[in-house]
C-alpha cells in the first residue's frame, strides 16, 4: 500500500497542507517543523504524486525522449549527451518508443497527452498533422537527425561524410566501389549519405552501379557478416565498400572477410560510419567517419531547454561535420 501525504501529516501531527508546503520548500514553515516532516518523509518512503503536482503547476519537469527503437551506439551516445545536460537541472527524462509505423502517432500522444514539458525526437518519421499539432500547442520539440523546416534540430552532415568516404577510396586507387546503405530510405540521413556517395563518384568520372548497393535492416555485427557472405556468394565485383549503415556492420564484414580469406584492404577496402572506439580494436582496424554524437545529444538538450524556458527563441538546425578517421581498413 502506498504512503499518502495524509499518512505523513498524521505521523508528524500537522496538516497535509503543511507537509505539501515543506516539500515545496515554502519559507513560511519553521525549520523545526521542516525537519520533523522531512524525517517522516524519509522514514515512511513517501514520494509525492508527480502527476497531481504537474496538474496544479502545469509543469511536469519531464523531457520526453522518443525513438522507434532504443538500440545501437548512435542512440546510446545521443542519450549520453542529453543526460550531461539533464543532470545539471531539475528535469528528468522519460523514454517513449514505438514501432516504426507508429512513430507519428507516438508523437501525437505525447503532445496531446501533455506527457512532458518538451520532446527530443530521434530519427522519427512524422506527418504534417503531427508537426501542426506541435505548432498549435506550442509544446517545444527538438528533432535529431530527421529534421524539419520550422523546427529546431541537430543532425550530422551526412552528405559531406559520405563524400569523404568515397573520395578516400578514389584517392587510394579504388574504382569498383560498393555501398551498404539502409532499408529505411525515407530517412533524410540515408538519402543524404547516398547523395554524397554518388556525387563523389560523379565528380571523379565513376558511374554509380546500383547492383553494388546492399541494404541493412538491423545495423548489427551479425548482419555485417551476412552482407559479406552475400558479396562473396553473389560474386559482387567490388574493390571497396562504404558501410554507411555503421561501424558494427563494417566490423562484422571484416570478421567474415578474414574467415573467408578475403584480404582487407588488399582485396576489399572498408570504411564505416560512427567512429566507434571499438573500431580501433579489430584487425585490420576500421577506417571510419566519426560523428560527435555526444555533443549532438548535448546540443539537442540545450536547444530544448532554451525553448522551454525562454520566449521567442529562433528555431535553427545545427549540423555537425563528421571527421574521417584513417586506420588500416582503407
Image: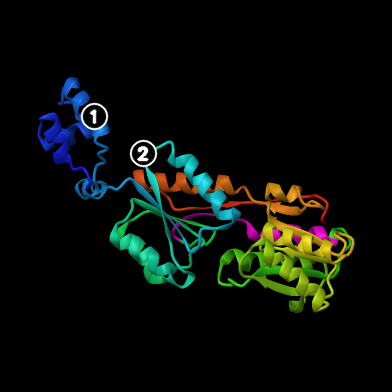
Q: Which residues are magenta?
A: 150-170
- The magenta stretch spans residue 270: no
Task: Give percent across and percent down for residue 64.
Answer: 39, 53
In the rendered structure, the answer to whether residue 72 lies left or right of residue 89 reads right
Residue 195 falls in image quadrant: bottom right
In the picture of the structure, the residue carrying the numbered disc 2 is 90
Eye-nearest disc, 2 or 1: 1
Q: CA distance from mark 2 to mark 1?
A: 19 Å
Q: Secondary structure at mark 1?
A: helix
Do callouts 2 and 1 mark residues in contact (Cβ within 8 Å)? no
Residue 298 position, x and y percent, is 51, 44
Characterize the local packing of mark 1: few (<14), some (14-19) or many (20 or more) Cα atoms within 10 angstroms.
some
Q: Main secondary structure of the magenta part?
A: helix
| Extreme-front residue of the structure | 1
Question: Could you say which quadrant of the image residue 261 lies in?
Answer: bottom right
Label 2, secondary structure: give it. loop
Q: Quadrant of the C terminus?
A: bottom right
Q: Quadrant of residue 229?
A: bottom right
Query: What residue appears at the point 41 percent right and 71 percent down from the top-left corner?
Result: 128
Residue marked by disc 1:
38
Amino acid at each position: 500500500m502506498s504512503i499518502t501525504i495524509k499518512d505523513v501529516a498524521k505521523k508528524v501531527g500537522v496538516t497535509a497542507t503543511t507537509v505539501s508546503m515543506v516539500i515545496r520548500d515554502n519559507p513560511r514553515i519553521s525549520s523545526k517543523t521542516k525537519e520533523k516532516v522531512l524525517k517522516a518523509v524519509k522514514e515512511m518512503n513517501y514520494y509525492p504524486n508527480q502527476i497531481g503536482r504537474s496538474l496544479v503547476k502545469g509543469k511536469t519537469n519531464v523531457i520526453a525522449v522518443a525513438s522507434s527503437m532504443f538500440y545501437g551506439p548512435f542512440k546510446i551516445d545521443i542519450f549520453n549527451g542529453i543526460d550531461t545536460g539533464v543532470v545539471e537541472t531539475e528535469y528528468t527524462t522519460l523514454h517513449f518508443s514505438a514501432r516504426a509505423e507508429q512513430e507519428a502517432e507516438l508523437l501525437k500522444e505525447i503532445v496531446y497527452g501533455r506527457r512532458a514539458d518538451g520532446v527530443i525526437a530521434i530519427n522519427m518519421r512524422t506527418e504534417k498533422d503531427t508537426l501542426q499539432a506541435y505548432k498549435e500547442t506550442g509544446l517545444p520539440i527538438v528533432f535529431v537527425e530527421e529534421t524539419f523546416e520550422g523546427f529546431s534540430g541537430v543532425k550530422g552532415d551526412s552528405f559531406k561524410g559520405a563524400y569523404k568516404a568515397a573520395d578516400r577510396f578514389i584517392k587510394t586507387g579504388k574504382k569498383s566501389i560498393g555501398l551498404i546503405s539502409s532499408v529505411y530510405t525515407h530517412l533524410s540521413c540515408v538519402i543524404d549519405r547516398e547523395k554524397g556517395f554518388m556525387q563523389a563518384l560523379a565528380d571523379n568520372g565513376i558511374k554509380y552501379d546500383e547492383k553494388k548497393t546492399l541494404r541493412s535492416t538491423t545495423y548489427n555485427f551479425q548482419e555485417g557478416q551476412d552482407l559479406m557472405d552475400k558479396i562473396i556468394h553473389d560474386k559482387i565485383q567490388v574493390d571497396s565498400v562504404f558501410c554507411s549503415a555503421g561501424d558494427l556492420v563494417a566490423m562484422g564484414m571484416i570478421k567474415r572477410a578474414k574467415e573467408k580469406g578475403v584480404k582487407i584492404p588488399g582485396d576489399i577496402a572498408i570504411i564505416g560510419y560512427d567512429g566507434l572506439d571499438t573500431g580501433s580494436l579489430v584487425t585490420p582496424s576500421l577506417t571510419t567517419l566519426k560523428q560527435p554524437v555526444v555533443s549532438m545529444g548535448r546540443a539537442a538538450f540545450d536547444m530544448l531547454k532554451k525553448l522551454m524556458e525562454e520566449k521567442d527563441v529562433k528555431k535553427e538546425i545545427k549540423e555537425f561535420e563528421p571527421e574521417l578517421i584513417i586506420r588500416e581498413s582503407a
